[in-house]
């Protein structure tokens, strides 16, 4: 059941599922273009990647009525979609109450087959209600935040681009914080990195003792490859402590850094990245958290124990209809499959200034290591637009607004000195992908039947069909999904 739950919910929360094509080994990723003098309807631009919009926006003009019409359409669409799944959740709650009442009324005299059907119905209703709650509270708002960010980019980037180019022409960009990129490796971003080693080791030990750290992927070549990319970035960063890297056996698309140079990449991240530049961009971002000592600073306020050992309190929030955060929901739902998000939100993601600083420094480190700096934006775009908000956990709503994050990243890329050659793809990355595929497949098979923490497990149930939409189509297709009837599925 747990395998189905992950696939069902992760699939249903996707905004778009079609993957970006991998970039050629020796060339920059290609962007689409619009014929000169031709302007598409504004809503069609919102389906384009951020990099395309940065290129196209300065030459596009939209009337005030077009913009207002699109803004109202987004507002109406989000409200309608959220309300739809709120109503779904209410319906499932009523059905749950009925099914539980029938189960209680039957008591010990209930026939085994009828009891089994009721157990399956309750189990599936719990899933569907949780799914609807997460859609309405998290995924749909995020999807529309992303669309609004792209609309803002179309409207505001032309002027932002002009100002950015003016800063470059005047040299004003050299007055920004951390402008001294020629001194990377000799800068002291946050004094005391070495003091974090002990704290990080204690956190790792505590997580392992508590059984909260997923096992490592049992493939030396994959572990060595991940370490080689991380080491390349670290050697061109401001990190002043040894780097410890491990790939964890988890389908979640995430990476997290604990104090003192402890970097964990989850298997799903390696699966999701299209090229080495994307992977390096995420790694560079996490290394930046360590160089700036963000996790160490926040751990003074929130210890590992306080995060992981208050599950009852979090469950109470969830059961009363509140959302403590989608990561905590998944941590409870899937055991340690939500670990990365819990760490990311509680230790790294709460302070928006920290996240923006890690974006800037991470882009600098990827640049200094010789990687295509658009890798970070391209991976962000994939998570925000095509992968959804469950498996791609590093950029949720507690993080800076999408528009601010993308514009700040693009400006930093423009400010950096140009490099003649930047790595996008490597044969080593492609070999890692080949070796990872059967490992991921086997891991998913092994996950079938593992118990969850919130769901009651009943063997032999027919799972509810997932929400109806076609992969590659926008969030509106999810919003048009019909209400499911778990009772019918069991008949």
Image: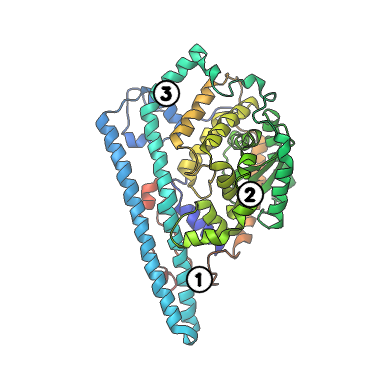
Q: CA distance from mark 2 to mark 3?
A: 40 Å
Residue at x-position 42% and y-position 44%: 143
Q: Secondary structure at mark 3?
A: helix
* Viewer-side label of 2, 1: 2
Q: Image quadrant for the N terminus?
A: bottom right
When the figure is inspected, residue 232 is found, relative to residue 421, above or below; the finding is below
The residue sitting at the left extreme is 65
Q: Nearer the viewer, residue 56 or 82?
A: 82
Q: How many marks?
A: 3
The residue sitting at the top extreme is 170
User: Residue 332 placed where, x, y %?
Assistant: 56, 59
* Viewer-side label of 3, 1: 3
Label 2, on which residue?
303
User: Residue 107 placed where, x, y %?
Assistant: 47, 84
Residue at x-position 42% and y-position 23%: 160
* Viewer-side label of 2, 3: 2
Quarter assignment of residue 421: top right
The residue sitting at the bottom extreme is 109
When the figure is inspected, residue 100 is found, relative to residue 43, above or below; the finding is below
Q: Secondary structure at mark 1?
A: loop
Residue at x-position 32% and y-position 23%: 37
Q: Secondary structure at mark 2?
A: loop
Which disc number belongs to residue 461?
1
Q: Answer with mark 2 or mark 3, whichever residue precedes in sequence.
A: 3
Label 3, on which residue?
160
């Amino acid at each position: 059941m747990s395998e189905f739950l992950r696939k069902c919910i992760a699939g249903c929360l996707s905004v778009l599922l079609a993957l970006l094509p991998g970039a050629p080994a020796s060339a920059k990723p290609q962007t689409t273009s619009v014929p000169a003098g031709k302007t598409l309807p504004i809503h069609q631009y919102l389906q384009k990647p951020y990099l395309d919009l940065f290129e196209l926006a300065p030459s596009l003009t939209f009337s005030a009525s077009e913009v207002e019409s699109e803004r109202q359409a987004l507002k109406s669409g989000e409200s309608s979609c959220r309300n739809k799944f709120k109503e779904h959740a209410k319906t499932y709650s009523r059905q749950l109450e009925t099914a539980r009442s029938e189960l209680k009324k039957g008591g010990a005299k209930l026939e085994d087959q009828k009891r089994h059907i009721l157990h399956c119905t309750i189990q599936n209703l719990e899933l569907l209600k949780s799914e609807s709650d997460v859609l309405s509270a998290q995924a749909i708002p995020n999807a529309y935040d992303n669309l609004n960010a792209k609309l803002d980019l179309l409207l505001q980037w032309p002027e932002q681009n002009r100002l950015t180019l003016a800063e470059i022409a005047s040299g004003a960009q050299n007055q920004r914080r951390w402008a001294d990129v020629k001194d990377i490796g000799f800068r002291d971003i946050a004094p005391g990195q070495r003091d974090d080693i002990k704290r990080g080791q204690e956190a790792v030990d505590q997580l392992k003792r508590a059984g909260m750290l997923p096992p490592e992927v049992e493939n030396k070549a994959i572990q060595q490859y991940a370490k080689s990319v991380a080491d390349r970035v670290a050697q061109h960063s401001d990190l002043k402590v040894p780097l410890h890297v491990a790939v964890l056996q988890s389908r979640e698309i995430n990476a997290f850094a604990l104090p003192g140079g402890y970097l964990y990449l989850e298997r799903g991240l390696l699966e999701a990245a299209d090229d080495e530049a994307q992977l390096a961009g995420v790694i560079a971002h996490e290394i930046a958290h360590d160089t700036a000592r963000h996790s160490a600073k926040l751990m003074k306020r929130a210890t590992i124990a306080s995060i992981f050992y208050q599950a009852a309190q979090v469950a109470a929030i969830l059961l009363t209809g509140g959302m403590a955060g989608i990561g905590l929901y998944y941590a409870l739902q899937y055991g340690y499959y939500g670990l990365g998000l819990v760490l990311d939100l509680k230790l790294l993601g709460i302070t928006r200034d920290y996240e923006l600083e890690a974006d800037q420094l991470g882009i600098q480190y990827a640049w200094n290591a010789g990687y295509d700096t658009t890798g970070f934006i391209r991976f962000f775009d994939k998570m925000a637009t095509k992968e959804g908000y469950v498996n791609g956990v590093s950029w949720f709503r507690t993080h800076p607004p999408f528009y601010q994050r993308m514009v700040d990243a693009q400006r930093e890329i423009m400010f950096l000195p140009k490099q003649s050659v930047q790595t996008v793809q490597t044969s080593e990355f492609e070999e890692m992908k080949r070796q990872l595929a059967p490992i991921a497949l086997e891991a998913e098979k092994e996950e079938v039947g593992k118990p969850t923490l919130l769901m009651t497990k009943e063997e032999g149930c027919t799972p509810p069909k997932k929400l109806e939409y076609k992969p590659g189509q926008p969030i509106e297709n999810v919003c048009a999904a019909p209400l499911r009837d778990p009772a019918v599925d069991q008949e």
